[in-house]
Amino acid sequence: KRQANSGEYIQWHSTNIQYLKGWDYELGEKQRSIITFEHANGWKYGDFYMFVDTTSPENASKRNIYAEFSPRFSLSKITGKDFSNKFIKDILISTTLEKVKNTGTHYLYGGAVDLKIPGFKFFKSNFYIRDDSEIAGETWQITLSWNYPFEIADFKFLFEGFADIVGGEGNKTENQIFVPRFLLDVGHLLDKQENKLWAGVELQSWHNKFGIDGKSETVPQLQVKYIF
């Protein structure tokens, strides 16, 4: 995370690239690799988060691309009024656009509450109305994301991740995905620059994956993340 001067339009930013490898997926290829480009920043009127997943990048015929773009608008920054208290860091208007290669677009809009929880760098809760452009009607979605750094002896660790809880829409049933990550600061361990190179495990646990009733999977994935 890089800080900028308070007067600048972009106040902080952080970018990383990740490599993940997993086995025993329930749907699609049993084994796959994923390269993820991820970026977040805080700007004058809110914050912005995005990522692009490229699945099976080494195999053109099976390659897939999935992206999310999530601008949020801070009521505190826009109005100049402090909405924080003992438990709340900020209240925001939240939006997200999801796009899968060769399919329709998903539009999400609603509100968010960023919480103050001891030890957590952030804990964000977003409450959306969700609209799949290829399905009639709308549904709801709750998205949680968190980042909790901690140390054991001389080792630096990171517990981060996200969870999506999604209602049924059209022929898709309700579904939930929980993705925690446990990472070790390898750069710090090797006496190099800390908070640059992380490695560990991401667990992807999905109930009714893609809204398909009865299709669930829990897959551990090896992960390496480089922040630049």
Image (cartoon, rainbow, N blue to C red):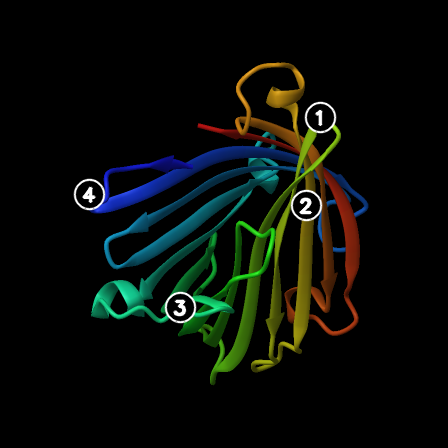
Please name which of the two marks, 3 or 2, marks the residue nearer to the observer.
3
Q: CA distance from mark 1 to mark 3?
A: 34 Å
In the rendered image, which residue does mark 3 sit on?
Answer: 84
Task: Give the percent coordinates (x, y) of residue 49.
Answer: 41, 51
Secondary element under disc 1, as helix, strand or loop, is loop
Tell me what residue is drawn at x 58 percent, y 55 percent: 146
Label placed on residue 154: 1
Q: Residue furthest top?
A: 191
Task: Give the vertical position of 112 relative to 139 (above or below).
Answer: above
Q: Which of disc 4 and disc 3 is earlier in sequence?
A: 4
Total labels: the figure holds: 4
Residue 223 left/right relative to 139: right
Task: Give the vertical position of 48 relative to 33 (above or below).
Answer: below
In the rendered image, which residue does mark 2 sit on?
Answer: 181
Please name which of the two marks, 4 or 1, marks the residue nearer to the observer.
1
Q: Which of disc 3 and disc 1 is earlier in sequence?
A: 3
Tell me what residue is drawn at x 71 percent, y 26 percent: 154
Q: Quadrant of residue 74?
A: bottom left
Tell me the amino acid under the disc marked 2. Answer: Arg
Secondary element under disc 3, as helix, strand or loop, is loop
Q: Which of disc 2 and disc 3 is earlier in sequence?
A: 3
Tell me the amino acid under the disc marked 4. Answer: Glu
Q: Residue furthest left?
A: 7
Q: CA distance from mark 4 to mark 1?
A: 36 Å
Please name which of the two marks, 3 or 4, marks the residue nearer to the observer.
3
Please name which of the two marks, 1 or 2, marks the residue nearer to the observer.
1
Residue 5 left/right relative to 202: left
Q: Badges 4 and 1: C-beta atoms under 8 Å apart?
A: no
Residue 61 left/right relative to 151: left
Badge 1 local density, few (<14 within 10 Å), some, or many (20+)? few
Tell me the amino acid under the disc marked 1. Answer: Asp
